[in-house]
Amino acid sequence: VGVIGHGGVGQGVVQLLEERRELLTRIGGPFTLVGVAVRDPARPREGLAPGLLTTPEALLADPRLDVLVEVAGGVEPAFRWVAEALRRGKAVVTANKALLAERAEELESLRRESGGRLFCEAAVAGGLPILQVLDRGLLANRVVRVEGILNGTCNFILTRMERERLSFAEALARAQALGFAEADPGLDVSGGDTAHKLAVLASLATGHPVSSRGLFTEGIEKLTAFDLQWAEAHGLRVKLLAIGRFGGGRMELRVHPTLVPKSHLISQVMDEVNAVAVEGDLVGPQLYSGKGAGRLPTASAVVGDVAQALRGERPLGARPQEEGGPWRVVPMGEVVSRHYVHLEVVDRPGVVARVAGTLAAHGISIASLYQPEAAHGSQVPLVFTTHPAPDAALTRALAGLAAEPFLAAPAVHVRMEA
Amino acid sequence: VGVIGHGGVGQGVVQLLEERRELLTRIGGPFTLVGVAVRDPARPREGLAPGLLTTPEALLADPRLDVLVEVAGGVEPAFRWVAEALRRGKAVVTANKALLAERAEELESLRRESGGRLFCEAAVAGGLPILQVLDRGLLANRVVRVEGILNGTCNFILTRMERERLSFAEALARAQALGFAEADPGLDVSGGDTAHKLAVLASLATGHPVSSRGLFTEGIEKLTAFDLQWAEAHGLRVKLLAIGRFGGGRMELRVHPTLVPKSHLISQVMDEVNAVAVEGDLVGPQLYSGKGAGRLPTASAVVGDVAQALRGERPLGARPQEEGGPWRVVPMGEVVSRHYVHLEVVDRPGVVARVAGTLAAHGISIASLYQPEAAHGSQVPLVFTTHPAPDAALTRALAGLAAEPFLAAPAVHVRMEA
């Protein structure tokens, strides 16, 4: 076994390969850690014999290597290493969702051509074995729906915004102080990380490689404490959801903040916890939740895959491709849902008429409307929800309102799921 | 593939083997349904070609049989059939938790001796692949805790008792009318079915065969609408939980009604839905929920196992036995928890003194006490909760109170989990 990467997860993997050696040996037979590849092998690392430190190239060329663990992250050069290992007939274990999501088709071709084994349970929801559930556990089912809270940072921020009435910036700072958000939280709060994970889930659910390129993605940066409070008061919660719907050769794939009724189990998943709601056509709705990140949860998924690789188990991919090739992704504009919109307006005559008129002009039916009393001429929230309407209609209506002089801030638009 | 049993699940299996033939063939290769064994093969069955109907003996002797599906239920003669099939080197797929739980050690020996493959995902929580999660998904973890709502009938009854303030008998009748409870609900409401499933979960969690014989089991029959309402008012819910705790060569295994804080995700699982909370030493707490019974959910788990058997996959049992042989089961009397006790007493001088004195004499510390005002001499509930105390102490104290003339009904005792 060789490991590329010695960040948090890599350190956890090296630690568990040693601490759980007896267990792993009983499962998969005896093994040796042949090397840990890092950027600068000359710099000593705590807890690692200097002889173990090596470069990715030297590790890949090591004839003793049977199982490569790739926990370096990033798309390149990780793709090159993984491709090289698969071509050489090594088993590969990776936790790299960016790699899996952005190079889905190429990795699938590589796997088919090389017959190499690629294990990736750790890539989505850390220690929660959701990929195995989709691939093996629900094998006889058609998976018709997947909804996930897949980014612990975002769920932590939304929990704090709701519970402590913090702004997005305040909650992000809190998350960073507590170690639940990185110094550069861009990929997390923008929804990009969630989109990577949705692509991996969709691949396992459909049996076709699904790329995250072009996948509709909105982050949580524009949400305000007001939106979270409004939701709370209306029996709802805002969650950053990855949503996949599958059927009839079509799939909806999207990542955006979503209003979910509190009566749904997934809305009860708080703080940094992850959750995936799955619906199979035979088993009905199911929910899986657990910690999605962290050194040891993620490392334990990697090491579980290593044990299966050593034991000669087949990797995921049991679900065969249905005929008809990859499914058509429904363009976001065609997706129909209910919508919540929060405008900050300067209270003056004709504002409500103008907003309502614009919605009517785009064929959107208002379901509820709310504006508190305020001093005439001051700034005030104007909130409306709609009956189901195509995303394109709502987007066009909001674009039509964007230039209105009474608009004091950009609109907050949150899609609603029943 | 041959099937023994043609009840609800058996019919679902035969239906799915046909409906999903294309999918199953792509996973495991082509297959033929060689026979469906029933008690009386002479009686025609709707939707089954008469030539398929056979006896278990004839099916087992059929040289074409590779995979036996046992969905007849019951311990005997199912054990005989399954043992015979394993000895003949057939793969066996069963949904029979009673068989697995009551003959755990014998089946384990048989599997080892015969090298036969035994698949059993459908035995616990129907379509929820919780056994695979414990066995494979958390392979690198030590499973330290399992808590399950494993009987949909009981959870449905408790939900109705809480929400509609029904008595146990009324809620049971409701469940029967809606098809959520059998005409003879004994094995469900007594906790026996849950105990079977706990034994199977514990086997997968520890890697040692665990029998349900002698496992501490209490049902929900004694609960009253008052208890459910009291819980509701105190931020708690009553659930029939299967509880397993594992560590240091010891395991706690018990099934009983349990007070759980509403803030715990598992307490939010309502109606006929099942759920399993699992804690791995590396991944922390996780929750899995979904429909636990029903023809198609259960049949889909059976058929998923059939596909894996046809594909040549290994059955569950990846988790190797730790050294030191089977773990010691902690006697129920030694288990420490908080307790809720509801007495119906005739209000007269000295009652509280007598109850408090008895508890004190057994070293039990009262945490809270509640008795509403009532007309002197009339019947009134007296409720107390305790600080953590050994089960044996509480049981002895209640036995000491049982003969008191002021007691108007048997005590209701519910253990509390934090």
Image: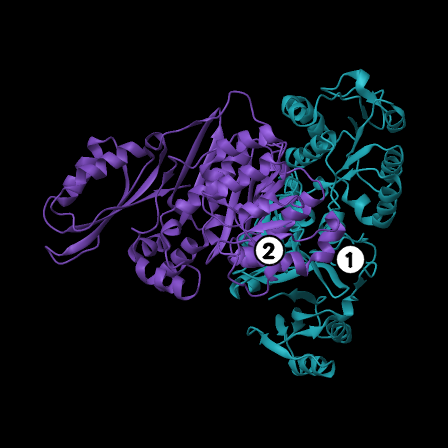
Chain colours: A cyan, B purple
Q: Where is residue B81 in the image (x, y as percent from the top left)?
A: 53, 42
Residue at image location 13% in from the left, 56% down from the top:
B378
Kind of residue at badge 2:
Val
Task: Tell which subunit mark 1 falls on.
Answer: A
The answer to whether any part of residue A160 appears in the image is no
Identified by mark 1, the residue type is Glu
Q: In this view, does B105 lie to the left or right of A196?
A: left
The x and y percentages for residue A51 are 81, 16
Is there any visible trace of residue B219 in the rendered image?
yes
Q: Nearer the viewer, mark 2 or mark 1?
A: 2
Q: Residue at x 53, y 60 (%)?
A: A262
Q: Where is mark 1, residue-wise? A: A322
Give residue A267's quadrant in the image.
bottom right
Residue B292: x and y, percent? 52, 53
Q: What element carries label 1?
A: loop
Picture layout, residue B278 above or below residue B304: above
Query: Between residues B172 and B316, which one lies in front from this camera angle?
Result: B316
Check if mark 2 and mark 1 are on a common chain.
no
Pick the front one: A120 or A379: A120
Q: Which of B209 and A53 is in front in this view?
A: B209
